[in-house]
Amino acid sequence: MSKLRCSITISLDGYVAGPNQSAANPLGEGARRLHEWVFPTRTFRAMIGGDGGETGVNDDVMREMFAHVGATVMGRNMFGPVRGPWGENPWRGWWGETPPYGHPVFVLTHHAREPLVMAGGTTFHFVTDGIASALEQARAAAGDRDVNLAGGARTVQQYLAAGFLDELELHVAPILLGGGERLLDRVADENVNLELVRTLAGPGVSHLKYRVRNPAKRAAD
Amino acid sequence: MSKLRCSITISLDGYVAGPNQSAANPLGEGARRLHEWVFPTRTFRAMIGGDGGETGVNDDVMREMFAHVGATVMGRNMFGPVRGPWGENPWRGWWGETPPYGHPVFVLTHHAREPLVMAGGTTFHFVTDGIASALEQARAAAGDRDVNLAGGARTVQQYLAAGFLDELELHVAPILLGGGERLLDRVADENVNLELVRTLAGPGVSHLKYRVRNPAKRAAD
């Protein structure tokens, strides 16, 4: 079966978003620096329509992150602002008219809504009946490819606690945010066992990859 | 000048000690697993008077941690229990009659007390006039060697915030403790800038080393 993979950048003190998140600053204060390792890579530059960029460990990790992925699942706040600063229709999301996914994206929400077809192969589907249903739909869309769990923190926590996540890769940025949204809060160890499968040294960032072994899941195997 | 170095193992969710710490269980629940990478190494086995053990990345890191160190600073709770479960004199510390330091150790406390000379070259000095004084005394004792900041979390936070720490190495264990004492709480980024200098892949643990650049200190240079 295809895997559910999550690949996400955290600060050294464990945050995926800084303090004082808002519609105008969805990452919170100071958190743009989390992603500085991404911007110079050749893979990222190609994603935004540029050329050139750096190869090496960080680029390899970026390319791998998007390889063999057929669908994405994300939380409501990661899709877009509830009340957007951009006119009447906040329901176009944060991601512009050509989102970088290029495949079906399943958004967890409490509000039913028709699928939103964007340019470049991305269609947002709004799922109101929970994380298991969103994953099931994403797996069906992905076929034999993997499903990417994009975030945010609460969504990752829910999938971890439920035993659905197969692989977690954390890109640890050398910054301290001191507040905001922590990725690994509210996740009890008794429900989540991690096996370190890889540590990679990128310039300015450490890539730590874990296989997730869930006791409940193992018992059901 | 010699460096102040801190080398400490944390869980993936950032804890150096688990929940429900007590005199009988000073590391808290589940936290012994943090240090599992240490026990099989040749360096650790030699420290406890054994032979054999594994060489490789983890052993190299262990050896480096204790190399070129002439004195140690630690917090009160790391020295020993306030009320010990071991008879009338809790003031012998956690570390047995031959502590593994083999050099002067400066313990931050509010209670003045005569130095405690142990076997094997370790003498505990009790410092009541604050972190700067403890560091100054440790530097004097260490000569041209480095000073090791042993912990716990609150003590590391104080030295970080004050701009005294030169190097921080975190050994990230693939476990989630879900509660306890977090190393990097209460440390604002504006006071602490980190530069990633090394990421090493050990079996079962990731070693992340940072140079600490403190704006206040830089301004005073």
Image: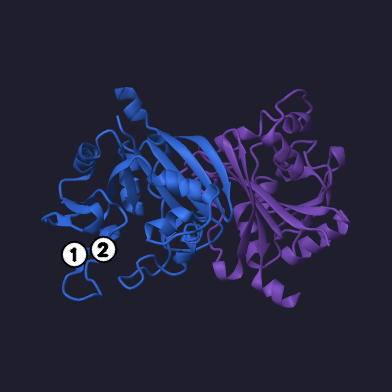
Chain colours: A blue, B purple
Image side of residue A127 versus residue A63, left or right: left
Q: Amino acid at mark 2?
A: Gly
Toward the right, the furthest residue is B143
Q: Residue at x 53, y 51 (%)?
A: A55
Image side of residue B48 versus residue A200, left or right: right
Residue B119: % across, % down = 85, 38
Q: Chain of mark 1?
A: A
Q: Please check whether the numbered discs 2 and 1 fall on a single chain.
A: yes
Residue B171: % across, % down = 61, 44
Residue A199: % across, % down = 55, 41
Pick the residue in front: A68 or A130. Answer: A68
Q: Residue at x 44, y 70 (%)?
A: A29
Residue at which label 1 appears: A91
Image side of residue B45 versus residue B172, left or right: right
Separation (CA) of disc 2 from disc 1: 7 Å
Q: Are marks 2 and 1 in contact (CB under 8 Å)?
A: yes
The answer to whether A91 is drawn above or below residue B69 in the figure is: below
The answer to whether A144 is drawn above or below residue A96 in the figure is: above
> How many marks overall?
2
On the image, which quarter does residue B56 sit in?
top right
Residue at which label 2 appears: A80
Q: Chain of mark 2?
A: A
The answer to whether B28 is drawn above or below residue A179 in the figure is: above
Residue B158: % across, % down = 64, 63
How would you rate the neighbour count of disc 1 (Cα within 10 Å): few for under 14, some for 14-19, many for 20 or more? Answer: some
Sequence-first tag of 2 and 1: 2
Q: Quadrant of the C terminus of chain B?
A: bottom right
How would you rate the neighbour count of disc 2 (Cα within 10 Å): few for under 14, some for 14-19, many for 20 or more? Answer: some
Toward the front, the furthest residue is A51
Is disc 2 placed on a helix, strand or loop? loop
Q: Is residue A54 visible?
A: yes
